[in-house]
Every structure is written in structure tokens, then in C-alpha cells.
Amino acid sequence: MEKLILITNDDGYRAKGIATLVEVAKEYGHVIVVAPEKSWSGKSHSVTLDNPIYVSTLKGFYHSSVEAYISTGTPIDCIKFALNNILSRKPDLILSGINHGPNYSINSYYSGTVGAALEGAFNGIHSMALSHESFDPDANMTLAIEHTKILIEEIFSLDQDEPVCLNVNFPDIELIDSKGIIFTRLTRAVWKEEFVERIHPGRPQKYYWLTGKFYNFEPEAQDTDLWAIKNNYTAVVPLTIDLTDYKTLQKLKTKGLTIKNKKQL
């Protein structure tokens, strides 16, 4: 049976990244796109609960063989709607991206691109979030194209039932300068936020723009996704949907710790 591949993104259906991804994916199976009509960058795993979601058909936008829809919802809404209302069977692979801008380290928690891939894993489907280091809407996708092909073939070759979710980040370099693909881990880092205060020109009211600086807690580490990107590797981090801290859990279990209600004491 022909592979079924579902694609979405968080930059909106017109972005070069998703068009590039569609061109690659249609070589490996039947592609269905359900993408947001606008950008939802930084919206993580948000879903729409306070407004109706509108979905419309997008005929021939990417390719005559590609079935496509646009949605007023978030990337997560797009995946949920596709799985429940469009697809006749569970897809073999969900691809999210290619995002314009990196989603390494702590950024992966905020990313709508990564959120959509995780939604696929929640539903037992192999998924990949793919992001490009460049924010340029016309970024050079040559390296991303070649490495996406390798990773699609790799994920289809895996002999396991448990869903795999890969967070992929491509460096903004020429293919000839790439050192290859490396499997690694998330960098420990954080954003130190700042809120820039301004005054609205039409009324005496303050408003704020969120800005911040990225702080890498382990700049010398050579086994992280940020190190990989900065050293001309495509960084691939396998993500898990289980957020349980097993190390701490085991410590608490070893202590035999049970917290009783005050009335029981």
C-alpha cells in the first residue's frame, strides 16, 4: 500500500518551507496537506476552543497530485482535524515544517512546528518537526531537501511500533559545507525575557513588546543540538511524549515517601 503522509506547519500555507517539504514528501507517498492560513509561530501546543474553525480546499496549490486544505486553526488543530475529518486511515508519517527559524533547545517547547509533530506522536504516528536556521522567507533549502530525504527513508526503515518523533534543525549553509546529520540532545538553555514598554500614540496607555536574550547553560558541551548546528551538522533530537522525571520518581519511591492528608495525621 502506498505510504500516506500528512503535512502541516506553523508559518502558514504560503511559506516556502512547507512547499519545499511537499515537493520532497510526494516522492515517498500520497501527500495530504492541512495547514494554517496564517503564522502561529511560538504557539506551542495550543488548540482553538473559543472560536469556530473554518477549513477550505486548496486545489492545485502545491501540485496536482497533492490534496491540500487551509484552516483558520492552529497547527495542532490542523493535525486533529485531519486525523478525525479528512483522512480515511492513520497516516504513515506526519511532517511539520520546514519552519523558517530554528527550533533547537528550549525553543522546541514553544514551537508550533514541534507541537504539531508531538501531536502525531500522541496519536501513535511517526512524526518529524523540521526547521531551518534562517528566518529568511526565501531561505536556501538545498541542504534541507537532501537531508529530509535521508531522514524520511530512515524513519520508514525503523522496525518498531512505538511512535518516533524527531526534532530536526538544518544549519543555514550550503550542502557542500555540511558535515552530515548527527543525532544528539537538546541544549540546556533559557530565554531571559524583557518587556519593552511603549506609549500608544493615540491614547495615554502603556503597552509592551516581549523581547529577550538566549542564554546557553552549556556552551562548551559538544553533544547538543545547538553545538551541532553551529558546527555545520543537521541536528536531530528524538523527543518523547512522556514528561515523567524517572530519576526523581525513583528517588521518591526508594524513600517510600507517602504524603498523607492533614486529617490523616
Image (cartoon, grey):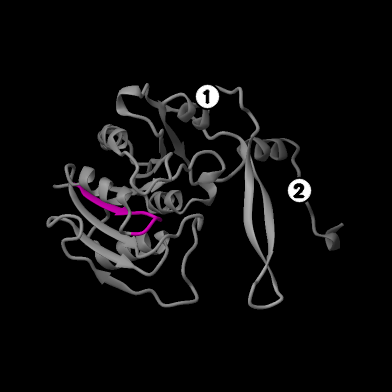
The amino acid marked with disc number 1 is: Asp
Mark 2 or mark 1: name the one nearer the start of the chain: 1
Res 135 quadrant in image? top left
User: Residue beneath label 1, please?
Assistant: 223
| Residue depicted at x 48% and y 43% | 103
Say if the magenta span includes residue 43. no
Percent coordinates x, y for residue 77 in the rendering? 40, 64
- Looking at the rendering, the stretch of residues picked out in magenta corresponds to 3-12
| Residue depicted at x 27% and y 46% | 21
The quarter of the rendered structure image containing the C terminus is bottom right
Say if the magenta span includes residue 9. yes
Res 245 quadrant in image? top right
Label at residue 258: 2
For disc 1, the neighbor class at 10 Å (few under 14, some 14 to 19, many from 20) is some
Percent coordinates x, y for residue 243 in the rendering? 56, 46
Relative horizontal placement of residue 81, taking residue 183 as reference (left or right): left
Percent coordinates x, y for residue 92 in the rendering? 26, 47
Relative horizontal placement of residue 171, taking residue 31 as reference (left or right): right
Circle 1: element type = loop
| Residue depicted at x 31% and y 59% | 13
Percent coordinates x, y for residue 227 in the rendering? 52, 27
Give the alpha-carbon distance from disc 2 to disc 1, as whole Å: 38 Å
Residue 198 in sight here: yes
